[in-house]
């Protein structure tokens, strides 16, 4: 029992810090041993994420623990054990949605959908609109009903749940929201993309099921999802494109499992990460946050090309996935305003670790981008609005 408890603690630490929830925890003193007390370090991290200030001694202890955790994640050395780059207000990278067809980033062209385009190929857009037309209020058994529900569910890690919880708050108060729409936060702190893509790891789906039940809805009423995944310590998987390809496979796998759990899931909107140039740990700094957008793009491109594991069309074989599209693109280069909307990411928009959105402005920025998206996107506004 003691060994199982220790393994659980270490697993929580491995899954934490990049993806852990931000509930405030009063940090007790570390163990007297010279060994790192990871439970104490986790408490310090939660304290920092909740907006509290760490002392110099606490910050040094946390940095030491983070370095040791990254070293263990990388098998005792290698890329994952490297220190985080120095915090910076901008990186000089160009947002993917701002890149043109002729632009290149490590061999990749611009545009969310490639070829400099931020809109889906016409055939894919037409198919998405057809899927959107299928979204109607359903009863608990998944049958159309005038008094039924349309469920929008989130999937992902702690950044996702923090941002989506704020979105739910804003959306539920928005007069444009339709009466049939029920918004459920299925994303969970500590649950990175690999856990959503593990058939033998049912807890993430069990927790999501309990949240659906608490909201008074069923799995058969889930018809739309917002999916935002990441990996802990992506440098373990090599420089770009290695880590992005690894993330892409987990995103695709999680979509297949989602379709199994939610048979009426028709549309999934994908987003990549927010700016991480202020990161104070090596667990997911830049350029990994920026490069995660290519993982999202490749998943969508694979579906457009007709990859079987992402098939959404029964006329083309077994349906394995919802149709996938870009949701809001969240990355901006720190204090450099995006051309399209002027989005900037200030230091106060990020929590103490520079990775999670801050409880105030950071979460609200993402929530408002997502709310604007579902109210205006051609495939979303019909199921969101009255």
Image: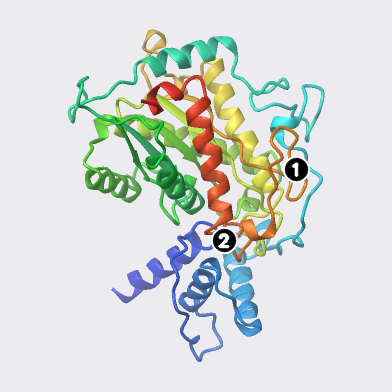
Residue extending furthest front?
Answer: 175
Q: Residue at x 30, y 34 (%)?
A: 261
Q: Is residue 289 visible?
A: yes
Place of residue 358 in the rendered image (x, y in percent of width and height, measured from the top left): 56, 59
Quarter assignment of residue 279: bottom right
Place of residue 139 in the rendered image (x, y in percent of width and height, measured from the top left): 19, 27
Q: Which residue is mark 1?
A: 337
In the picture, measured across the screen, residue 135 lies left or right of residue 233, that is left
Q: Residue at x 54, y 49 (%)?
A: 364
Secondary structure under tag 2 reads helix
| Residue in the foreground of this view, choosing between 291 and 373 | 373
Instruction: State the scheme by which the image is colored.
Output: rainbow
Residue 269 lies, with reference to residue 210, above or below; the image says: above
In the picture, measured across the screen, residue 75 lies left or right of residue 149, that is right
| Residue in the foreground of this view, choosing between 275 and 61 | 275
Crowding at mark 1 (Cα within 10 Å: few <14, some 14-19, many 20+)? few
Residue 345, disc = none
Crowding at mark 2 (Cα within 10 Å: few <14, some 14-19, many 20+)? many
Residue extending furthest bottom?
Answer: 32
| Residue in the foreground of this view, choosing between 117 and 164 | 164
Q: Which residue is mark 2?
A: 73
Q: CA distance from mark 1 to mark 2?
A: 35 Å
Place of residue 259 in the rendered image (x, y in percent of width and height, measured from the top left): 35, 29
Quarter assignment of residue 212: top left
Say which label, 1 or 2, has the lower sequence index.
2
In the picture, measured across the screen, residue 160 lies left or right of residue 180, that is right
């Amino acid at each position: 029992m003691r060994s199982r408890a220790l393994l659980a603690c270490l697993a929580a630490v491995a899954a934490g810090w990049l993806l852990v929830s931000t509930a405030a925890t009063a940090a007790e003193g570390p163990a007297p041993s010279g060994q790192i007390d990871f439970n104490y370090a986790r408490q310090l991290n939660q304290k920092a994420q909740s907006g509290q200030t760490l002392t110099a001694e606490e910050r040094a202890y946390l940095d030491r623990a983070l370095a040791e955790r990254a070293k263990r994640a990388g098998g005792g050395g290698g890329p994952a054990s490297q220190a985080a780059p120095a915090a910076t207000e901008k990186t000089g990278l160009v947002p993917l949605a701002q890149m043109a067809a002729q632009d290149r980033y490590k061999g990749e062209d611009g545009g969310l959908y490639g070829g400099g385009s931020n809109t889906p190929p016409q055939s894919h857009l037409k198919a998405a609109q057809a899927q959107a037309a299928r979204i109607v209020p359903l009863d608990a058994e998944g049958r159309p009903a005038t008094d039924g529900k349309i469920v929008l569910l989130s999937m992902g890690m702690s950044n996702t749940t923090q941002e989506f919880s704020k979105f739910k708050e804003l959306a539920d108060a928005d007069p444009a929201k339709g009466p049939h729409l029920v918004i459920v936060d299925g994303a969970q702190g500590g649950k990175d993309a690999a856990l959503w893509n593990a058939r033998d790891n049912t807890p993430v789906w069990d927790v999501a099921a309990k949240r659906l039940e608490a909201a008074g809805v069923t799995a058969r009423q889930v018809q739309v999802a917002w999916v935002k995944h990441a990996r802990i310590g992506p440098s373990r998987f090599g420089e770009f494109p290695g880590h992005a390809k690894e993330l892409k496979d987990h995103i695709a796998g999680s979509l297949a499992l989602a379709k199994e759990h939610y048979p009426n899931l028709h549309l999934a909107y994908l987003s990549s990460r927010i700016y991480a140039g202020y990161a104070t740990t090596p667990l997911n700094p830049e350029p990994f946050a920026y490069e995660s957008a290519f993982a999202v793009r490749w998943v969508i491109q694979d579906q457009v090309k007709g990859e079987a594991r992402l098939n959404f069309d029964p006329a083309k074989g077994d349906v394995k996935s919802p149709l996938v599209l870009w949701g809001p693109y969240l990355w901006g280069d720190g204090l450099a305003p995006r051309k399209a909307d002027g989005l900037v990411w200030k230091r106060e928009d990020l929590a103490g670790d520079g990775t999670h959105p801050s409880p105030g402005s950071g979460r609200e920025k993402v929530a408002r981008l997502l709310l604007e998206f579902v109210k205006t996107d051609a495939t979303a506004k019909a199921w969101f609005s009255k």
